[in-house]
Image (spheres, helix red, strand yellow):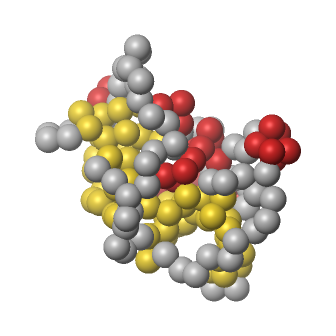
Amino acid sequence: MKQYATFHLGKNLLGVEVLLVREINRLMSVTPVPHCPPYVRGLINLRGHVATIVDLNVRLKMRAEECVQPHQVILKTNDELAALRSMWQRQDLLTCADTVGFVVDGVGDVVEVEDHQLEPVPAGQEITGGEFLRGVVQLENRLLAVLNLERVLKMEANELRAA
């Protein structure tokens, strides 16, 4: 069984494994950085450490809606996750070498999901941003889309050249 921190992007419910999350805060002042891909909103000062902030609406190619109280989900770094990877033999616990976070429209609950409940993204379905999903989980009254953070956080060489 795994626990997922859930959050909202518009009407969509998305989640990431709780073990990957360092903290969730209200969105801080973001300093834009020139020549970055459009989904990199900029940098923040997180108690003396610089963190890159990704706009998930842009990264997942979703239409952004007006958000009253955006939050940022700050992820643990790969170094912070090393002990967990070793202790639980979970080589899949990876995010990024540097401190990174992403902007979400709202924060949900933590949900527990059995491994067998995580289903592949339905084939033949045109799901916006589907290439960034690990799978989907049918909850009691809605669908939870589980992010593939390795894919979400990977910047392609052609994106860097185009910026």
Residue 93 lies, with reference to residue 18, above or below; the image says above
Q: In this view, does 84 lie to the left or right of 99?
A: left
Q: Is residue 142 left or right of residue 46?
A: left
Look at 66% across and 81% down and name the residue there: 45
Picture coordinates of residue 89, whole percent (x, y): 58, 39
Q: State the residue in front, 37 or 138.
A: 37
Picture coordinates of residue 148, whole percent (x, y): 53, 39
Q: State the residue in front, 138 or 44.
A: 44
Q: State the residue in front, 6 or 63.
A: 63
Q: Is residue 48 left or right of residue 121?
A: right
Q: In which quarter of the image is residue 113?
A: top left
Look at 24% across and 33% down and name the residue there: 138
Residue 44 visible in the snapshot = yes
Looking at the image, the residue that sits furthest to the right is 161
Q: How many discs appear?
A: 0
Look at 66% across and 58% down and name the residue there: 40
Picture coordinates of residue 9, whole percent (x, y): 38, 53
Residue 90 lies, with reference to residue 44, above or below; the image says above
Residue 85 visible in the snapshot = no
Looking at the image, the residue that sits furthest to the top is 124
Picture coordinates of residue 140, whole percent (x, y): 14, 40
The N terminus is located in which quarter? top left
